[in-house]
Image: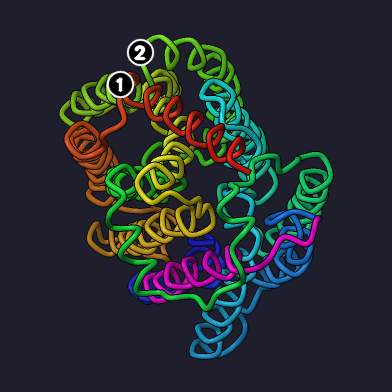
């Protein structure tokens, strides 16, 4: 979307930065509201989360496609208004799907290893589709290193249709198995948002997870936002990003297979920290030793992906553990609230990173109307690309180490305690 705004609609990057900041902040605020609504609805036998996915999948897809309508011939102010409104509406529809979807894995199983597998498979599914997008995008959307406006909405329509099919398959195949006894007996109550906030801030595992994600995502997402410009302007060939996408299949397969064993051996928190540290060191070197050959960079970047893959894949398993931690300290399961609180922070990170990615273009002097950028601009793109990556992950690692409390041993201890409580509650009926 950022690339579409900049290269197709010719929206000033500074204006795009403001637009993304406002819409993403609204999206973040919208998350806990929807999460609390999800938790407040009584399960009528069709599940707590699946009905939401079925209801909002198609509206979300339709609004997503409309967001890529080419308004480049409209007045500049009208273009901004359309971009703003269409994006806000899309984010609302997306939240109504994403919060229930993200909470679903926490009620599918309470087994630690199965949750790690669910997190791996979720990441694998996202990686497969993202890889297709990364490969198809440069090959289909560009001609002679320049974007073709009408092709954006076509590709968006194809991806949206596939997304709807996948969500419907999810709603039919995934089963909600865990229902806390205390929640079954409770009558529907009015939502107390003050209490919701208090509970969230008392969950140290969730706070650690949210802070680490926020910091890491800001750094990584800004880097991802600069990807197109790195290949298009720094390396001079946007098609290289398609090659990078093809090779990412190999890296993803290695990560998918390996993380199951490394997380089991070292623990989720521990492995995230170890692997991310490796990538930080490599990118710190790259900052001072720029690479001009695109293929060399793709290979090195792919190896670094193996490092940060632990962070990207296992973070969802940490969220599920945070839901259990919430039950441990409060005696009740509020999956929607906990997940939506985490999603709120991720959306705040998206707001900051989307804004920063556009502001970065302003700071490096990027000219949206120029066919070729100056050498000084391309050099600045490389510098921003590497230092933001390093800074984001270093801070995220430190937060995970000193704030997030669930080591491998403590996670297992928590799971055992909850199992004993549930067995006792069931026996007392």
Q: Residue at x 51, y 18 (%)?
A: 255
Near-viewer residue (429 or 349): 429
The residue located at (34%, 58%) in the rendering is 200
Q: Residue at x 71, y 66 (%)?
A: 65
Residues at marks 1 and 2 touching, judged by CB atoms closer than 8 Å: yes
Q: Is residue 67 above or below residue 372?
A: below
Q: Is residue 279 magenta?
A: no
Camera sees residue 95:
no
Does residue 413 appear to the left or right of 425 in the view shown? left
**Spot occupied by residue 88 in the image (x, y as percentages of width and height):** 54, 76
Give the residue number, with chain letter if any, for mark 1: 270
- Asked whether 42 falls inside the magenta stretch, the response is yes
* Secondary structure predominantly adopted by residues drawn in magenta: helix
Q: Residue at x 36, y 41 (%)?
A: 234
Q: Quadrant of the C terminus?
A: top right
Within 10 Å of disc 1 (Cα), the crowding (few <14, some 14-19, many 20+) is some
Q: Which image quadrant: the N terminus?
A: bottom right
Question: In the image, is residue 281 above or below residue 3?
Answer: above
Percent position of residue 138, x then y: 61, 43
Q: Quadrant of residue 414?
A: top left
Q: Of residues 3 and 317, which is closer to you in this image?
A: 317
Real-space CA distance between mark 1 and mark 2, rounded to the nearest whole angstrom:
6 Å
SS of the residue at dot 2? Answer: helix
Residue to which mark 2 is pinned = 266
Q: Secondary structure at mark 1?
A: helix
Give the magenta range: 21-45
Q: Does residue 316 lie above or below 162 as drawn?
A: above
Query: Is 13 positioned to the left or the right of 91 in the image?
Result: left
């Amino acid at each position: 979307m950022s690339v579409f705004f900049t290269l197709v609609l010719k929206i000033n990057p500074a204006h795009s930065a403001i637009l993304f900041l406002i819409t993403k902040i609204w999206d973040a605020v919208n998350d806990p509201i929807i999460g609390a609504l999800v938790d407040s609805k009584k399960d009528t036998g069709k599940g707590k989360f699946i009905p939401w996915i079925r209801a909002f999948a198609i509206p979300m897809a339709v609004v997503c496609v409309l967001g890529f309508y080419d308004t480049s011939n409209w007045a500049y102010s009208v273009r901004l208004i359309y971009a703003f409104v269409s994006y806000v509406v899309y984010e609302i529809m997306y939240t109504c799907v994403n919060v229930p979807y993200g909470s679903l894995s926490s009620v599918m199983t309470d087994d630690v290893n199965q949750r790690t597998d669910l997190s791996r498979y979720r990441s694998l599914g996202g990686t497969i589709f993202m890889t297709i997008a990364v490969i198809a995008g440069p090959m289909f959307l560009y001609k002679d290193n320049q974007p073709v406006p009408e092709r954006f909405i076509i590709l968006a329509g194809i991806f949206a249709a596939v997304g709807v099919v996948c969500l419907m398959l999810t709603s039919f195949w995934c089963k909600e198995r865990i229902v806390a006894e205390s929640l079954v007996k409770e009558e529907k109550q009015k939502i107390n948002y003050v209490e919701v906030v208090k509970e969230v801030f008392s969950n140290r595992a969730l706070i650690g997870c949210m802070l680490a994600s926020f910091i890491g995502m800001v750094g990584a997402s800004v880097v991802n936002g600069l990807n197109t410009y790195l290949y298009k302007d720094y390396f001079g060939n946007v098609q290289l990003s398609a090659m990078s996408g093809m090779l990412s299949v190999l890296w993803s397969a290695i990560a998918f297979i390996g993380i199951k064993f490394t997380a089991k051996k070292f623990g989720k928190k521990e492995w995230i920290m170890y692997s991310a540290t490796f990538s930080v060191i490599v990118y710190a070197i790259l900052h001072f030793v720029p690479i001009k050959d695109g293929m060399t960079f793709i290979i090195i970047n792919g190896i670094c992906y193996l490092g940060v893959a632990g962070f990207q894949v296992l973070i969802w398993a940490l969220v599920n553990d945070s839901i259990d931690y919430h039950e441990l300290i409060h005696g009740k399961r509020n999956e929607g609230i906990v997940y939506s609180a985490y999603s709120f922070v991720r959306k705040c990170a998206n707001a900051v990173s989307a804004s920063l990615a556009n502001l970065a273009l302003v700071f490096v002097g990027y000219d949206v109307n120029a066919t070729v950028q100056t050498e000084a601009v391309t050099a600045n793109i490389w510098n921003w690309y590497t230092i933001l990556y390093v800074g984001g992950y270093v801070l995220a690692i430190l937060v995970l180490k000193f704030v997030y409390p669930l080591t491998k041993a403590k996670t297992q201890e928590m799971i055992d305690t909850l199992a004993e409580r549930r067995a006792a509650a069931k026996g007392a009926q």
